[in-house]
Amino acid sequence: MLEVRGLRKVFQPLSGPAVTAIGDVSFQVGAEQFVSIVGPSGCGKSTLLQCVAGLLRPTAGTVLLGGREVTGPPDGLVLLFQEYNKSLLAWRSVLGNACFGLEQKPGLTRADREAEARHYLEMVGLGGFERHYPWELSGGMQQRVAIARALACKPQVLLMDEPFGSLDALTRFELEDTLLRLWESLRSTILFVTHDIDEAVYLSDRVYVLSRRPSRMISDTAVDLPRPRDQLASREDARFIRLRHQTFELISKEMATA
């Protein structure tokens, strides 16, 4: 479904030396897979997602979606930004935000758009909040609106940039499980960036580990935990503990050499 070949990204400021954010990264994400990317802080994870989404042009390398090269924001791919509270439209209601992406789809009436948006708001547990505004909701509820808006577009691939990073632990666990239920129901392909190793192992089919900047791929690990997963049982599983330790050791070594 998604392939990155030899991607490199160099930023050239107006003054001063060039900064190589991504050195050489290649990987694949299969259809309907849930894949996470982790790595040291500042290693270029968000930059990588923006290149995959067609928002940044890579200095070298290629991104392929369904076998077709990505040269700009492609149809069938949605990026969910880290700062969800800034990506929501404060002047629109919850329903209006969830309808936003659908307004670009031809052939849908307003009633069609609202029915579709209500369906996804129900799926993320926000039925009854359609007339509220983002600033009236908690952080976790705002992120649910952002997820509903993204899923309403029925993306083939959903890119998620540390979507739960600013939430408290209990809300984070709840949204992780909500996301897994939605993914298992809709069978989208998800590429998920996080700084939380436990989260990456808990959610994913595969975990990719990036080196420090300029980043390269240093590990590709299959997660052999059974599904459906449980916040307590899965995290206490010996396989989970082993994968978490392996990933932590890799990242710790990279940080130690910085």
Image (cartoon, helix red, strand yellow):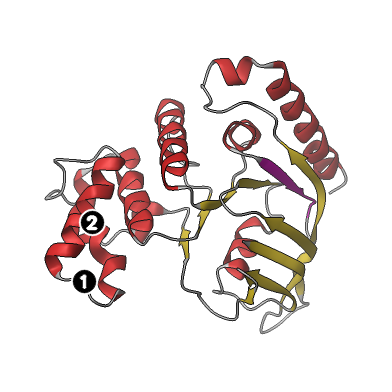
Name the spot of residue 122 as percent of width and height, x first.
24, 42
What separation in Å lies between label 2 and label 1 (alpha carbons)? 10 Å
* Stretch in magenta: 206-212
- Asked if marks 2 and 1 touch (Cβ < 8 Å), the reply is yes
The magenta stretch spans residue 130: no
Q: Which mark is residue 108?
A: 1
- Looking at the image, residue 172 sits to the left or right of residue 252; the answer is left
Which tag, 2 or 1, sits closer to the chain's start? 1
- Looking at the image, residue 246 sits to the left or right of residue 118; the answer is right
Q: Which mark is residue 116?
A: 2
Q: Residues within 10 Å of mark 2 (few under 14, many from 20)?
A: some
Above or below residue 187? Residue 229 is above
Foreground pick, 99 / 141:
99
The magenta stretch spans residue 209: yes
**Quarter-of-image position of residue 220:** top right
Name the spot of residue 103 as percent of width and height, x first.
25, 72
